[in-house]
Amino acid sequence: MGARVAGGERTSSGRGGGQTDQPRNGANLGGMTSPETAPGAHDFIREIVRQDLADGTYTRVQTRFPPEPNGYLHIGHAKAIFQDFGVARDFGGICKLRLDDTNPESEDVEYVDAIVEDIAWLGFEPAAVIHASDYFGQLYEWAEYLVEQGLAYVDEQSAEAISQQKGGYGAPGVESPYRDRPAEESLDLLRRMRAGEFPDGAMALRAKIDMQSDHMWLRDPVMYRIRHAHHHNTGDEWVIYPTYDWAHGQSDAIEGVTHSMCTLEFDAHRPLYDWFLAHLPLPFETPKQIEFARLEFTHTVTSKRRLKKLVDDGVVDGWSDARMPTLRGMRRRGYPASAIQEFLAEIGNSRTNARHAFEAFEAVVRRQLNETAQRRMAVLDPVKLTLTNWPVGSDGAPVVEHFEVVNNPENPDDGVRSVPFTGSLYIEREDFAEVPPPKFFRLSPGREVRLRGAYFVTATDVVKDEDGNVIEVLATYDPETRGGNAPDGRRVKSTMHWVSADHAVDATAHLYDRLFSAEVPGARTGEPLDDLNPDSLQVRHAKAEPALADVAPGEVVQFERLGYFAADPDEPMLFHRTVGLRDEWAAIQRAQAAGKK
Ligand code: ATP
Ligand code: MG
């Protein structure tokens, strides 16, 4: 994979890419305790906030996180959450969760609890959970106020006519024939719109600003449209609904938001955001809109509409499928919330949209899990290994030995566990070759290898089924090599993991590949779903050491030599491979560096 991605976008590195300011300390994962020590503490938004407090523009900080309740949160939202909640926390302010439910048709209460839960996973708790629809009454009063001021009018033209008259960049707008109607007439019509006298689309309320403005959003934008639709929060109380622009800044103002952060696509709306606020009798200071770059990754999509289609089409097993870039999918997959936080701190914040290499995020995940995950042995594709010289005890049964194994070499506090060993074992099928290809140093007839922490073994023979497949490998072990070292100092070229067949527990392992094979899904055809990877899930029936049964739901362990695996939160003995052990990101960076020379 190269440095550049198609579609004219830039893949930036995990460290420093798309960043406008100095790199920061990604090691501080414990919590954002003060502006000085917080990850992301020096981004341009915090700089603005710091300045605003210093010069008295605001005396307090209040933010909001405003998702539309029409789907589950995804990794892109995590960036907004860390901005909105993080800035409030860093400056001793508050952040509320505001469900942006101005669109009656597409919203559902089903999502609200999930949104709160996902925010909690990232470490935040909203100061309150509110709805934009809570403000419909105040918004309406303010709409009448603007009409009375001669700053809004009812337009009886169709939506198509209104949009045609809008013009474009360099093309003048055309004023509506209803633009200069008397305020009383507009007021009367607005009240009757609200009372439900007119059908959908018969007329709309528009702000009276400037049809020649260079800012398209100032060309008499629509404030209310008629929509005879049931709303999940307000029921049938309203048949007119505010547009995003008429609702958002006003909701900010009603709540007392100071800094209203959003993604770059709202940059063009800012003049309108400011215009409405400048013409209304606000209860608090005027809020300020600040835009930042969207977070995008290679090999995935962050659009609720597209993610919903994956769910509806059965491509994935629901919103929390471990391949989904939803926060619940990522949680199931075993990505630590702290890795998301560390990654966001690494890339910093800026006003430049960039698509980040997913491998760069995985490198952070791997680094964190290396420190926190206990090690276990599991064999994903088992083949029997029988030690023909393994002793039988005085009771006639094969001897069982126990090896003390360190749970996590990175963390002595994790202690040791006892792993049973017998002459009847499972090893990985791919760790044996009857006829070894060149450079194959693992087990083959006549070759000696180390079974990790146990003994040296030498393969002697194989047992095959009638189709000629190897179903059992026969070997001898050297009792002198107990613990995995030969007293005579002789060496082996390979160390393999193993599981005692008599003690093994069964586990199911899900191995994942990218959900989308293209770096930029949809770059070729415009339709991301055309780039779906049909082989993004492989299921393995594994044999594992007994201690795997003790792994708590949701906990991540390292399967030695195979990667990090997260225990499913619901289904016992189901493990999702979070990430492999190989640092693909380092390889990509080396390739990029080589390409630049
Ligand atoms: P979608 O297209 O997935 O529906 P949206 O932008 O409509 O996304 P909302 O639920 O309306 O999503 O967004 C809630 C907040 O999250 C907004 O402030 C929005 O700017 C922010 N947000 C959404 N997607 C991203 C992203 N990819 N990166 C950063 N912030 C995002
Ligand atoms: Mg939206």
Image (spheres, rainbow, N blue to C red):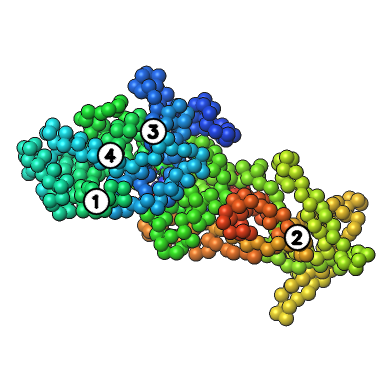
Mark in front: 4 vs 3: 4
Mark 2 nearby-residue class (10 Å; few <14, some 14–19, many ≥20): many
Mark 1 nearby-residue class (10 Å; few <14, some 14–19, many ≥20): few
Q: Secondary structure at mark 3?
A: strand
Mark 3 nearby-residue class (10 Å; few <14, some 14–19, many ≥20): many
The residue singled out by tag 3 in the image is: 63
Q: CA distance from mark 2 to mark 4?
A: 62 Å
Mark in front: 2 vs 1: 1
Residue 327, horizontal then vertical, whole percent: 48, 48
Horizontal side of 101 relative to 317 (left or right) equals left
Residue 96, horizontal then vertical, whole percent: 40, 36
Q: Residue furthest bottom?
A: 466
Dot 3 and dot 2 residues touching (CB under 8 Å): no
Q: CA distance from mark 3 to mark 1?
A: 30 Å
Q: Residue at x 20, y 42 (%)?
A: 223
Dot 4 and dot 3 residues touching (CB under 8 Å): no
Q: Which one is nearer the viewer's eye here, 89 or 578?
A: 89
Horizontal side of 556 relative to 149 (left or right) equals right
Q: Which one is nearer the viewer's eye here, 192 or 166?
A: 192
Q: CA distance from mark 3 to mark 2?
A: 53 Å
* Mark drawn on residue 499: 2
The residue singled out by tag 1 in the image is: 236
The residue singled out by tag 4 in the image is: 135
Visible residue check, residue 190: yes
Q: Which one is nearer the viewer's eye here, 232 or 284?
A: 232
